[in-house]
Amino acid sequence: MISLLALAGGLAAAQAPAPAPPQGALPGGALRVHRPPRTIAIDERLAADAGLRVGDRVVLSATSGGAGDTVVLAAVTRRGADPSEVARAEYRVRLHLDHLQALADYGDRVDRFAVATRRPSVAGRVLDDVNRVAFGFRAHRSADIAVGTSRTFQVVSRFHRAIGVITIVASAIFLLCILLLKVEERRRDVAALRLMGISRATVVRSIVLEALLVSLFGAALGTLVGWAGTLLINWHYQGVYRTPLVFALVTPGIVLFAVGLALVLGVGAGLAAAVRLVRTPPLALFGR
């Protein structure tokens, strides 16, 4: 916009009665047009480490200490939430394509480029057509590239899933043992209820209901602790790697799975403990 306005002003001045040539005019009455410096965008990590702000002038060069171009910082971009770039301590600078080509002196070549299709349904056909006529390069789906670069995180995910299964099994066994001990401590209460004429089914229902309430309270408390843990984990690792990537999260599906599992394990453990207790004669529960 600045260049176009300056050019328009120069044309208007040429059509008016010729005044004295301004300072810096070229032979023949042509005006020297001073082009503003090119603009670039950098990522927020580079801006923070170098102390740069929008509007600052910096010098870009292809080699360290070599001659370069003076450019203006036009924007600071946020880093994407890409798992493959979490551990990379790289800085990113975005330039116009012709500026990058001239600065890198790379010629009419590119390492890779992306092609977007209007409809996802035709992506497979376009991929086959490109690979059939291409020479010296090969086209891939962006989803396949993302999967290929995220294999490490898939292994970590499977490892976490295995740890989760082991933890669930161990906690189920621990819960069953705790409920058995708690019910055993109430042997005299159960014996008194049985001698008063309370049926076995009523005693079992009361113990199972109590185990259900304890399971609901435990699930709610566990959800709250897990949510607080995700906040702490994300705050720490997003600060360490300076990325918006979410390292831990609690989704509605996870909450429903945890509550359902807690209810099943709690009711099952309570039922097993109650049935074991009511099958014992009341007098034997009193120790006689």
Image (spheres, grey):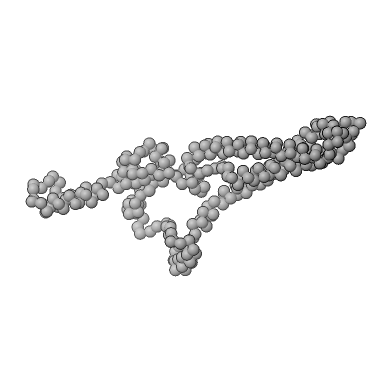
Viewer-proximal residue among 83 and 4: 4
Residue at image position (35%, 59%) is 108
At 85% across and 33% down in the image, what residue appears?
A: 196
Examine the image and state in which quarter residue 52 appears: top left
Looking at the rendering, in which quadrant would you find the C terminus?
top right
x 70%, y 37%: residue:
213
In the image, taking residue 13 as reference, residue 238 lies left or right, namely: right
Q: Residue furthest right?
A: 288
Picture residue at 83% right of the left edge, 33% below the top: 193
Q: Is residue 95 left or right of residue 15?
A: right
Instruction: Residue 39 in the image: state x and y as whole percent.
Output: 32, 46
Who is closer to the viewer here, 275 or 23? Answer: 275
Q: Is residue 174 left or right of residue 42?
A: right
Q: Is residue 188 above or below residue 167?
A: above
Q: Is residue 26 visible?
A: no
76 or 200: nearer the viewer: 200
Residue 53 image offset from top left, x and y in percent: 35, 38
Residue 110, position as x, y percentages in the image: 40, 57
Report how many numbered discs are placed on residues in the image: 0
Residue 193 appears in the picture as rendered = yes
Using the image as rendered, state which of residue 59 and residue 156 is in the foreground.
156
Q: Give x and y (percent) for residue 141.
A: 49, 59
Q: Is residue 71 left or right of residue 90?
A: left
